[in-house]
Image: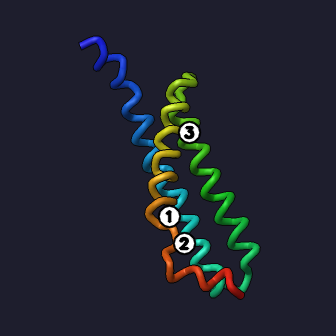
Amino acid sequence: MKFASEIFPFVTPFFAGIFVSLFYHIGLWWTVKSLPSTHSPALLSIGSFYIRMGITLFVFYLVMNNRWERVAVCLFGFLVVKYIMTRMLRPGENASHINKR
């Protein structure tokens, strides 16, 4: 029972890291997909970066609650999603023609 009481406070930061990572990387995906059709790609890129980073850092700050262990677990959840998404969204064999220009 002691193990569960020590682990439970870190469940919320882990899931917060997962959700903020999904927000960050889906926002990045949307930004990259929108770049060709926008009139101001630099403004879209910079604006999207500041919004995504600001919200991500704000969530990390809220989750931290003056304990570095909580923000470390939140970062771990963030990186787990990043790893999974980069593996799932890796370009396939059909995308190899992009580099042949």
Q: Point out the tag, 3 or 1, that comes first from the N-terminus.
A: 1
User: Residue at horizontal 76%, vertical 74%?
Assistant: 42
Instruction: Look at the numbered discs 3 and 1 and tell me whether their residues touch, using CB distance below 8 Å.
Output: no
Q: Secondary structure at mark 2?
A: helix
Residue lying at 54% horizontally and 64% vertically, measured from the top left = 27
Residue 96 place in picture, x, y as percent: 58, 80
Q: Report how far apart the C-alphas of labels 3 and 1 lie in the structure.
A: 18 Å
Residue 67, quarter of picture: top right
Three-letter code for the amino acid on which mark 2 is drawn: Trp
Look at the numbered disc 1 and give the secondary structure of its residue. Answer: helix
Q: Residues within 10 Å of mark 2 (few under 14, many from 20)?
A: few
Mark 1 residue type: Ile
Residue 57 disc label? none
Q: Nearer the viewer, residue 99 or 35?
A: 99
Expressed as whole percent of the image width and height from the top left, the position of residue 81 reads 46, 51
Q: Which mark is residue 60?
A: 3
| Residue at mark 2 | 30
Q: Position of residue 3 (x, y in %)?
A: 30, 16
Tell me the distance, in whole angstroms, between the alpha carbons under discs 3 and 2.
22 Å
- The residue most toward the top is 2
Residue 26: give its label.
Answer: 1
Between marks 1 and 2, how big is the CA–CA gap? 6 Å
What amino acid is at disc 3?
Phe
Q: Nearer the viewer, residue 85 or 66?
A: 85
**Looking at the figure, which quarter contains the C terminus?**
bottom right
